[in-house]
Every structure is written in C-alpha cells, then in structure tokens.
Image (cartoon, rainbow, N blue to C red):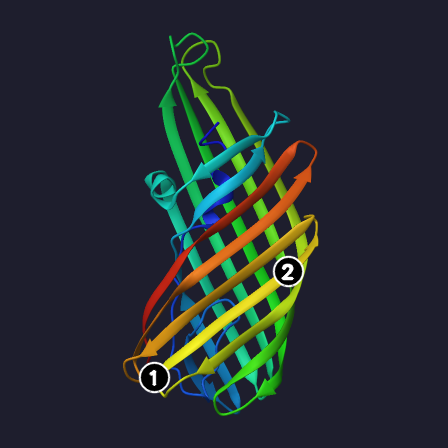
Amino acid sequence: MRYSIAFATLLTVGLLAAGPVRAADITSPMTPELNQTEKDGWTFAFSPYFWAAGMSGDTGLFGLPTVHTDMDFGEILNDLDFAAMAVGEARYERYSIFADIMYSKISSDSGTPRGIVADDVDVTSETFAGILGAGYAVLQSDRGYLDLVAGMRVWHASTEISFSGGILDGVSREDSATWVDGLGGIRAKYSITDKVYFTGWGLIGGGGANVDWDVAGGIGYSFNEKVSAVAGYRALGVDYSNDGFVMDIVEQGPIFGVVMHF
C-alpha cells in the first residue's frame, strides 16, 4: 500500500528555474524567475523547475480504507520513472497570463509472501496537475510588484495494480480521478539590489477538491544577464475525495534553480 499511494507524490519532483532580478524583469507566479524574450511590448517567459519535496497525508484507492503515509524525497525518488515540470508566462504592462504543468510517473515491483495469490505485484502511478491563470499588478515600482492572480488547476491521478503468477496471474485493476479547482491569490517580488531579490506566491481555492493551496518563498541571485540562481521552500496541499478515491496530502520541500538565459 505504501507504493499504491505514490501517485500523489509527483507533484513532488521538478526543476525550478530563476531569471534576472532587474526591476523591469517579469516572473511567473509559479517560479521565482524565468528565461525571457521581449517582442512588441509583450514579455514572454518559460522554464522547467526542480522541487525536492516529501509527502505526508492520507490516500485511499479501490474503495479500501484510507492509509496514512509520510515519505521523504529520497523514498519517492527511488521509484520515480519520469517527471516533467515547466512554467510559462506572457505579460503586457500590468497584465499577465501564466501556466504551470507538473507530470510524474512512479512504478514499483515487489514480491508477495508464499506466492500463492501472486508472485509479484506491479504498481504504476501517474499524476498530472496543470494551472492556467491571469494576473494584474496592483502595486508596481522599479523595485518590484504585487500581483493579484486567479486561475484554474486541473488534476488527474491514476494508479494501476497488476499481478503476475499465482491465482491472480494476469489480473490488473486501475483507479483514477480527474477534477478542476479554482484558485486565487498573490505573487510578489522585491529586488534588494540589482542582483539579489526576494520572491514568493500564495494561492488557495477549491472546487472538485475541498481545498487546494500552494505557497512558496525564495531568494534569488543574478550572476549576469545569462545565468541566475534561486533557492527557497514550497508547500502544496490538496484534499480531494470522491467515490472511494481519496487524496488528502501535503507536499513540501526545498526548491532550487540554475538557468541559462538567451
């Protein structure tokens, strides 16, 4: 069961990238800084990011009782097959449009005692979370900004269990859920110097889930116009339950990024 709940975790792995810290730069609500180019008054940004998060909370599958789990990032990484996370933004003056996508696939294979019911059990979990939203800068200066943001986040989580050998040889079962949450909140950035800045965001909402929230804070440093770095901390939580599928978890951990700008 420890691995059957791993579908919820991969929100937990990724790459968080940073961009230059000049006051004129534009950042996404989901990462401190981004690669960017400018054309006809619009500023565009895109970046993958990394998030070394652990997970704790309750999960339930196949109508079975919920199970509490507490896994650190190292445990999750052992079973990780693939993870991809990226964020993009377009901004014009005080207005912005942003997107953040997270996907992961985790699998585990373990033997069963005695091998009567089955010799091996394979568990494969996939998780997708993507947000699309817009923002408006209510405060803006040459040092930074404070944006109000709103958007929609789509979740999809699925877990498949397959048996080989024994009585259940060839049997496979899948449990999954898809839902949409509305989110609102703020993002902010403040440049202490031309090279050092603080950045952060806070989002909360719900819809399909009882509650869906995401907060982070970090400090960044720009080495030059092409290379920058950021370090911080992020926490994300979601509480969803429907028809025996339960995902009530909190993921949190450090975020890092080093990015080249072109």
Q: Quadrant of the C terminus?
A: bottom left
Left or right of 65 on screen, residue 253: left
Pinpoint residue 63: horizontal percent, then vertical percent.
64, 26
Could you tell which of marks 2 and 1 lies nearer the N-terminus? 1
Looking at the image, which is closer to me, 183 or 193? 193
Secondary element at tag 2: strand
Which residue, as the protein is rendered here, is positioned at the far front?
192
| CB-based contact (under 8 Å), mark 2 and mark 1 | no
Find disc 1 in the rendering and name its residue.
195
Quarter-of-image position of residue 114: top left
Pinpoint residue 24: horizontal percent, then vertical percent.
46, 89
- Would you place residue 128 above or below residue 69 in this image? below
Rendered residue at 66%/48% (across/down):
179
Rendered residue at 42%/51% (across/down):
53
Q: Can you tell which mark lies on residue 204?
A: 2
Pinpoint residue 54: horizontal percent, then vertical percent.
43, 46
Q: At label 2, which amino acid type do we have?
A: Ile
Left or right of 116 on screen, residue 148: right
Looking at the image, which is closer to me, 180 or 196? 196
- Would you place residue 54 above or below residue 35 in this image? above
Left or right of 97 on screen, residue 47: left
Rendered residue at 46%/68% (across/down):
31
Query: How dense is the environment of label 1, judged by Cα within 10 Å: few (below 14), some, or many (20 and up)?
Result: some
- Would you place residue 66 above or below residue 78 in this image? above
Query: How dense is the environment of label 2, judged by Cα within 10 Å: few (below 14), some, or many (20 and up)?
Result: some
Secondary element at tag 1: loop
Rendered residue at 51%/43% (across/down):
8
Q: CA distance from mark 2 to mark 1?
A: 30 Å
Q: At label 1, which amino acid type do we have?
A: Lys
Quarter-of-image position of residue 225: bottom left
Pinpoint residue 154: horizontal percent, then vertical percent.
61, 54
